[in-house]
Image (cartoon, rainbow, N blue to C red):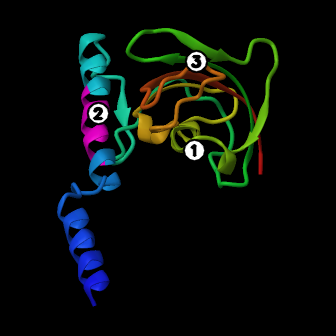
Amino acid sequence: MNRLLVIILLLAAGLSSCKKGFDVAEEVRAQGVVDDKIVEDYIAANGLTTTAKRIDTTGVFYIVIAPGEGSNLFTNSTRVTVDYKGRILTSGKEFTQSNNFHPSFTLGEVIRGWRLGIPQIKKGGTVRLLLPSRYAYGPYPQQTLGLPENSVLDFDIQLLDVTN
């Protein structure tokens, strides 16, 4: 009986000293507020307020450089061939580009920002995407690309081909 009482007292003491657990949803929401301000401030500071369009309420902005031609039917299984360049929005540091290699992707396998932004143009078109981190890689650093966690990204994407 005494052992049980000691165990209960130790358990109670241990539980009373616990801090509130990590709230993932709150952390994501807070980062979203920071990211959205970074993107909106960038747009204002660079005179893009008339050309940058927000996709719904996502915080993803796009600027159509060239609209392209053809069908605008895109699904998660649509295969796209692209030429692209990616920069960290806050520093301008380029972290990736396709160079002379033009990769093909299924839209369902790319980051969410690309799934939302690429359908804003048609074959042959070019779009610039400004992506809050939640629509890119979020809190996950991409060490091979040199991206820290919660990077707000800036992509130029030319849509070379579309296959449904």
Label pair 3/1, CB-CB below 8 angstroms: no
Mark 2: which secondary structure? Answer: helix
- Vertical arrangement, residue 1 with respect to residue 152, above or below: below
Picture quadrant where residue 114 is located: top right
Q: Which label is found at residue 142? A: none
* Observer-nearest of 117 and 3: 3
Q: Is residue 39 left or right of residue 163?
A: left
Disc 2 residue crowd, few under 14, some 14–19, many 20+, Cα 10 Å:
many
Q: In the rendered image, which residue does mark 1 sit on?
A: 115
- The residue at the point 25 percent across, 63 percent down is 14
Q: CA distance from mark 3 to mark 1?
A: 22 Å
| Nearer to me, 99 or 143 | 143
Q: Is residue 130 left or right of residue 40?
A: right
**Which quadrant is home to the N terminus?**
bottom left
Within-10-Å neighbours for mark 3: few <14, some 14–19, many 20+: few
Label number found at residue 146: 3
- Name above or below for residue 105 compared with residue 156: below
- Which image quadrant for residue 34? top left
Q: Mark 1 or mark 3, which is nearer the start of the sequence?
A: 1
Q: Secondary structure at mark 1?
A: helix
Circle number at residue 36: 2
Q: Which residues are magenta?
A: 29-37
Cα–Cα span, label 3 and label 2: 22 Å
Whether residue 69 appears in magenta in the rendering, the answer is: no
What amino acid is labelled 2 in the image? Answer: Asp
Q: Is residue 49 above or below residue 5?
A: above
Main SS of the magenta part reads helix
Q: Earlier in the sequence, mark 2 or mark 1?
A: 2
- Amino acid on which the number 1 mark rests in the picture: Arg
